[in-house]
Image (spheres, grey):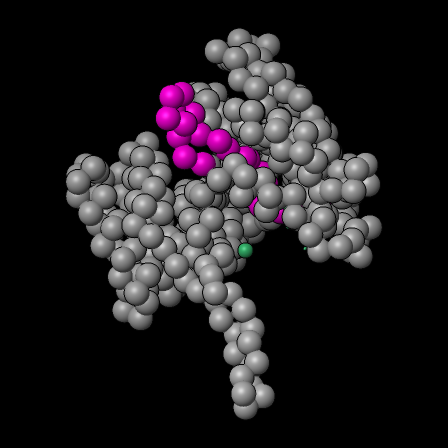
């Protein structure tokens, strides 16, 4: 099978970490795992410099046609004064919107070799492997009305609207249940049905989808604030957590701090399956930004970006063994003591971006 990838390295360390992913893609291609074709294009500040827009229409067309988009990172001080709607970060919002990427997957994996870097005690996080499934295109970040109005008495009133429909909840629930079937067959749904109508509907719909379509997956319900507390108290009790856009934003950042460094965290954003091919639009990116403070020095950690490609292998191409292999290779180089500067500790071996990429391939 042949897959077509669009590589959008972006700005800052984006180009440095994408170079390592290219070598990884080529390695899998040469091994005959699948045939990958890729094209690279500008996005973010570099695209703005070239044609005055953070993402061109031609690039958008390529993204829509691709089997998966690999996205580096965008932004930096150079574009601080660029108008709001063409700023580098607008590219990501446009891609998410036009590709209708409603499901954001954020794994929180704690590699044993890095357990000391966690905010928690080693025994609480060692071997941790949870997946947060966040609804990405609905909820309070997008609901209308969204405004600040001035009242007759001179006071101002700010309004954001938390809004979810049955079908929006059903489709994110199905993503979570499907993923749970490939893992420990357990989903916890986080909401606040005690104080929010959207939470009441969320709980009802997730329960119904679970009972009617996924009787084999066990489903738990947890209030989102309690979920935040439990993530810090006893994170290994969870496998897949599904939640709305706002709670997912917060819970995934909490989970991130359990695993050590920003340079280690991959993510995937998925759309609906195509009616004829069954393939989902998808974008894979590290959680971190363009790290202007270390850009151009060859010291950025490429693991978040490479682990994002492992997610593409798993979720877009169904190449589960290849994804496992790549993830084991990442764990393997960490076990051998190789560290980029961001995860370096005394007694380990400090390496640069390219050395880390090469070591993962060797492993
Ligand atoms: P950042 O994630 O770029 O950097 C935060 C800190 O983590 C920095 O000290 C950086 O050196 C370090 N860091 C991040 N990734 C690293 C890696 N792979 N290896 C080693 N160290 C790493 O966040 P910051 O500084 O708030 O934002 C910088 C720029 O990136 C801004 O323009 C921001 O808007 C943009 N940004 C873009 C994102 C995206 O493209 N998805 C996400 C977050 C921020
Ligand atoms: Mg956040």
Residue at left offset 69%, top offset 52%: 85
Please identify the quadrant where the C terminus is shown.
top right
Which residue occupies the foreground of this view, 125 or 90?
Answer: 90
Residue that sits furthest to the front in the current view: 152
Question: Which residue is found at the position 65% from the left and 43% from the top?
Answer: 91
Residue 96 visible within the image: yes
Residue 71: x %, y % from top left: 62, 36
Ligand 2: give its quadrant. Answer: bottom right
For residue 347, above or below residue 37: below
On screen, residue 4 versus residue 242, left or right, reads right
What range of the chain is rendered magenta?
271-290
Q: Is residue 315 visible?
A: no
Locate residue 340: give its quadrant.
top right
Does the magenta-highlighted stretch encompass residue 221? no
Residue 112 spot, x, y in % from top left: 48, 41
Farthest-out residue, bottom: 153
Q: Nearer the viewer, residue 163 or 240?
A: 163
In percent of width and height, residue 294 lies at: 77, 46
Residue sitting at x 37%, y 65%: 225
Residue 322, placed above or below residue 92: above
The residue under the point 54% across, 69% down is 147
Q: Nearer the viewer, residue 312 or 160?
A: 160
């Amino acid at each position: 099978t042949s897959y077509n990838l669009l590589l959008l390295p972006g700005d800052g360390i984006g180009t440095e970490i994408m170079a390592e992913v290219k070598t990884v893609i080529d390695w899998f291609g040469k091994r005959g795992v699948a045939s990958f074709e890729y094209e690279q294009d500008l996005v973010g500040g570099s695209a703005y410099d070239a044609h005055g827009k953070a993402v061109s229409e031609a690039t958008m067309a390529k993204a829509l046609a691709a089997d998966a988009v690999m996205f580096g990172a965008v932004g930096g001080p150079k574009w601080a004064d660029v108008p709001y709607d063409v700023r580098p970060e607008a590219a990501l919002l446009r891609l998410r919107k036009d590709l209708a990427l409603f499901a954001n997957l954020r794994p929180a994996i704690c590699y044993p070799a890095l357990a000391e870097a966690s905010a928690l005690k080693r025994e609480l996080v060692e071997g941790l492997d949870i997946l947060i499934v966040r609804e990405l295109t609905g909820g309070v970040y997008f609901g209308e009305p969204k405004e600040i109005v001035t009242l007759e008495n001179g006071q101002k009133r700010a309004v954001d609207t938390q809004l979810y429909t049955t079908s929006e909840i059903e489709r994110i629930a199905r993503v979570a249940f499907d993923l749970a079937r490939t893992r420990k067959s357990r989903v916890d749904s986080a909401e606040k049905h005690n104080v929010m109508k959207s939470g009441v509907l969320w709980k009802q719909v997730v329960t119904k989808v679970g009972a009617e379509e996924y009787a084999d997956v066990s489903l738990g319900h947890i209030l989102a604030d309690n979920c935040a507390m439990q993530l810090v108290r006893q994170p290994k009790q969870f496998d897949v957590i599904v939640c709305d856009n706002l709670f997912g934003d917060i819970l995934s950042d909490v989970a991130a701090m359990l695993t050590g460094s920003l340079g280690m965290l991959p993510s995937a954003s998925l759309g609906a399956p195509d009616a004829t091919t069954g393939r989902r639009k998808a974008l894979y990116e590290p959680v971190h930004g363009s790290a202007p403070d270390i850009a151009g020095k060859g010291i950025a950690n490429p693991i978040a970006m490479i682990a994002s490609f492992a997610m593409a292998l798993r979720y877009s191409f169904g190449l589960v063994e290849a994804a496992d292999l790549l993830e084991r290779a990442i764990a393997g180089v960490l076990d051998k003591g190789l560290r980029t500067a961001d995860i370096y500790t005394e007694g380990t071996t400090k390496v640069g971006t390219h050395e880390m990429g090469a070591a993962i391939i060797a492993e």
